[in-house]
């Protein structure tokens, strides 16, 4: 590498100082002169210029750095220059940290990546909120006294078109154009009426609004060239007024005319002053004994508390609508008919041919209602106060909710009080109430039915007590069915009686079981691999409630769970007596649900413990509870199994192995239904030696509902 001899440069500078001041210094390998615009011109195509290198710590302690001083910071790996007040990094990769976006939110001006915004509120000048306006050729601002005259900017081309007859011209221009040749002489013009505006196609229009007479609110209509008014039989044929000159209609007063046409039409005769039309009256309307007919709707003023139509020359005789009416069942708007109160005044409904003394119904102002023939109600007919029909023949005591027939004072405690006779159902059949012995007697003068005679008197006896009530009849025959709702009726049950003759419904097969022998599941096959929903119970005085995979029906009740006790029994649904280590004779009061006592004694699990689960496929699955147990406090074993069969509800109990002291001597074996001490029980033994410890896997019993 060639080096530049500094001493040589100094010498050159001394010798040619003036030239160097004028031309600058050139450092190169081709001896070329420096560029005239540069004080230092370094040129090379193979080498670069090496700027002073230093650490950040060295850079920041440079004393009084000159503005524009450039160094390379070896810590940041970038160039830094001094801008006169601080060091600024020249970011590599062409990224300039000053490349930020301005944004304005409200009056706050901010830069991206800069947390300090500038509030511009103080720079708002409310006096600059001005509007431009133009008056003639003068332009001005609101709240500003100066104006700009734009007259000099208006040229001669700003001209207006005008049409006089058929001649078209421009303002400030002497030439004109005659449009006569462009008129369409085909006379193919059509009149049109939109609202109150009358017009011609390709012509002008005339507003007829000012000619409407509010006392004669009629609508103009145009069909072809025929002009007519609503509610007026006359019409005007305008065909003669349509010419070849594409003319405009005009209306002056009631006179209709066309431009360039000397004829006119007076429309005054078509205004009908006697037709009210859609009229809003501003004063009293006097019909002068004329009628208002063919009215679809007649509406009075819409005031909620006084919306009335007077029907006579008095404000007391009106028909109307009122709000907040609360009489009877009303609690809102109602039609009102008002009249001066007088006992002999009111309202009448009558045929047009009825005399004044006749009618269908009448209602007086004091509330009396009279009908000519029948008063009928398709719903409830409510009498709010006392009502009497023909003296004492029929009387309603609304205060005490009583009805009297034959008496004006129905007795206390009776809803219906009949006085003075029997109830005649037909010409020969009576209902007789005998007050003396509190009996009801039915009398029949023709006691024959289906050709058979029977006693014609049927009596219902009673003294007010159930024990003394009875039915006595000379003959009792039922044509259809008798229904006894007492007791507990259900399908398949029969009516039975107790010793006193009281009847009740019972299930003839309820709690009726049959005992039989059966086989059992092999004890050594019971495992989690062979049973579904397999579970294990172990310990002393423990229990578990297992969910049955099917429903078991016993005594008419369906069960879906089984309580398993470590003390040798299972109880359907829940263990109402707990684990219960002390056995009882069956039926046991401690257990209110069906109980299967395989070997009810104080037992504790051992070996394989107490395993349970089910085998098979619906609808003939079998739930198994397999006991591997011994008597508590001893070594006498009891191994047995309880099976519950789906569908048949059959329950099997099979014994696999017992000791000489666990052959039933201290246990309860058997079955009882629901009901506790009142349950139907099928005991096999209570503290009785039943099992044979020498005959392995042969002892078994089963129980099943009778079906």
Image: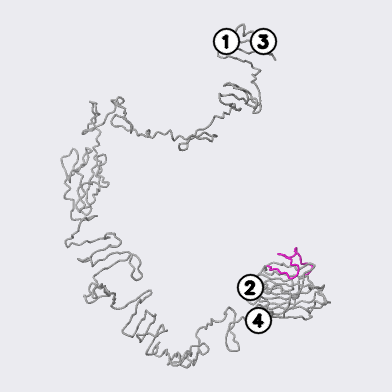
Measure the alpha-carbon separation of dots 4 and 2. 19 Å
Based on the displayed image, in which of its 4 quarters is residue 406 positioned?
A: bottom left
Q: Name the residue under label 2.
A: 558
Q: Is mark 3 on a helix, strand or loop?
A: helix
Mark 4, secondary structure of its residue? helix
Dot 4 or dot 2, earlier in sequence = 2
Q: Mark 3 points at which residue?
A: 7
Image quadrant holding the N terminus, namely: top right
Q: Does the magenta stretch include residue 150?
A: no
Nearer the observer: mark 4 or 1; the answer is 1
Which residue lies under the disc numbered 4?
678
* Image x and y of residue 16, in percent: 60, 7
Instruction: State the extent of the magenta-drawn residues as a range.
Output: 522-546
Q: Which residue is situated farthest in the top direction here?
A: 15
Q: In this view, does 151 lie above or below 474?
A: above
Give the residue at x 29% y 78%. 373
| Vertical relation: 619 (above or below) 706 | above
Residue 379: mark: none
User: Real-space Cα distance between discs 3 and 1?
Assistant: 18 Å
What residue is at 65 percent from the left and 74 percent from the top? 553
If you read the primary sequence from the N terminus, does the residue marked by circle 4 or circle 1 appear first? 1
Q: Which residue is drawn at 16% across and 43% down?
A: 264
| Residue situated furthest front in the rendering | 63
Toward the viewer: 441 or 226?
Answer: 441
Q: Residues within 10 Å of mark 2 (few under 14, many from 20)?
A: few
In this rendering, which labeled residue sits more in front, label 3 or label 2?
Answer: 3
Q: Which mark is residue 21?
A: 1
Q: Where, quadrant-wise, is the C terminus in this rendering?
A: bottom right
- Colour mode of the rendering: one colour
Residue 322 percent across, percent down from the top left: 30, 64
């Amino acid at each position: 590498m060639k080096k530049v001899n500094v001493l040589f440069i100094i010498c050159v500078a001394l010798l040619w100082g003036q030239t160097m001041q004028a031309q600058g210094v050139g450092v190169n390998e081709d001896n070329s002169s420096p560029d005239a615009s540069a004080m230092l011109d370094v040129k090379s195509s193979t080498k670069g210029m090496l700027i002073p290198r230093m650490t950040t710590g060295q850079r920041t302690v440079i004393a009084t750095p000159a503005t524009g001083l450039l160094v390379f910071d070896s810590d940041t790996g970038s160039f830094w220059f001094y801008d006169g007040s601080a060091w600024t990094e020249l970011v590599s990769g062409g990224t300039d940290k000053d490349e930020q976006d301005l944004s304005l939110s409200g009056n706050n001006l901010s830069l991206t990546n800069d947390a300090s915004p500038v509030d511009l509120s103080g720079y708002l000048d409310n006096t600059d909120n001005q509007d431009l306006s133009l008056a003639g050729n003068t332009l001005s601002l609101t709240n500003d006294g100066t104006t700009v005259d734009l007259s000099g900017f208006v040229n001669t081309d700003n001209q207006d078109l005008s049409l006089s007859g058929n001649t078209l011209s421009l303002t400030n221009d002497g030439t004109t154009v005659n449009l006569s040749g462009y008129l369409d002489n085909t006379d193919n013009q059509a009149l049109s009426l939109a609202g109150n505006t009358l017009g011609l196609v390709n012509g002008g229009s005339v507003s007829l609004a000012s000619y409407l007479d509010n006392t004669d609110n009629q609508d103009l209509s145009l069909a072809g060239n025929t002009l007519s008014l609503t509610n007026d039989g006359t019409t005007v044929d305008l065909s003669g007024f349509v010419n070849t000159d594409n003319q405009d209609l005009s209306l002056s007063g009631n006179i209709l005319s066309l431009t360039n046409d000397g004829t006119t039409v007076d429309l005054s005769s078509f205004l009908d002053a006697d037709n009210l039309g859609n009229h809003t009256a501003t004063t009293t309307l006097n019909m002068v004994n004329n009628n208002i007919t063919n009215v679809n709707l007649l509406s009075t003023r819409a005031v909620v508390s006084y919306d009335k139509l007077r029907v006579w020359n008095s404000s007391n005789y009106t028909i109307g609508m009122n709000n907040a009416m609360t009489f009877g069942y009303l609690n809102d708007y109602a039609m009102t008919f008002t009249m001066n109160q007088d006992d002999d005044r009111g309202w009448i409904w009558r045929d047009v041919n009825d005399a004044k003394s006749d009618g269908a119904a009448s209602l007086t102002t004091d509330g009396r209602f009279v009908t000519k023939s029948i008063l009928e109600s398709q719903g409830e007919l409510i009498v709010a106060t006392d009502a009497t029909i023909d003296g004492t023949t029929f009387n309603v005591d609304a205060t005490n909710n009583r009805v009297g027939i034959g008496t004006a004072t129905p007795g206390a405690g009776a809803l219906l009080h009949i006085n003075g006779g029997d109830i005649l159902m037909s010409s020969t059949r009576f209902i007789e109430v005998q007050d003396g012995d509190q009996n009801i007697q039915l009398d029949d003068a023709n006691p024959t039915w289906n050709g058979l005679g029977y006693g014609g008197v049927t009596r219902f006896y009673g003294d007010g007590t159930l024990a003394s009530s009875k039915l006595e009849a000379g003959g009792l025959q039922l044509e259809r069915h008798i229904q006894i709702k007492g007791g507990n009726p259900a399908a398949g049950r029969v009516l039975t009686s107790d010793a006193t003759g009281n009847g009740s419904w019972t299930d003839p097969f309820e709690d009726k079981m049959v005992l039989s022998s059966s086989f059992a599941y092999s004890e050594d096959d019971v495992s989690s691999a062979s049973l579904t929903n397999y579970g294990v119970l172990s310990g002393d005085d423990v229990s578990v409630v297992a969910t049955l995979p099917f429903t078991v029906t016993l005594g008419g009740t369906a069960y879906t769970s089984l309580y398993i006790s470590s003390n040798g029994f299972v109880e359907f649904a829940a263990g109402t007596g707990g684990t219960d280590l002390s056995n009882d004779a069956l039926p046991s009061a401690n257990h209110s649900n069906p109980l299967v006592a395989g070997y009810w004694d104080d037992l504790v699990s051992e070996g394989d413990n107490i395993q349970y689960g089910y085998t098979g496929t619906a609808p003939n699955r079998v739930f198994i509870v397999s006991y591997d147990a011994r008597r508590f406090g001893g070594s006498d074993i009891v191994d047995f199994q309880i099976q519950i069969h789906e569908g048949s509800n059959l329950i099997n109990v099979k014994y696999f192995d017992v000791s000489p002291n666990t052959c039933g001597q201290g246990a309860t074996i058997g079955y009882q239904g629901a009901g506790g001490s009142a349950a139907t029980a099928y005991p096999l033994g209570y503290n009785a030696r039943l099992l044979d410890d020498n005959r392995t896997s042969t002892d078994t019993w089963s129980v099943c509902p009778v079906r």
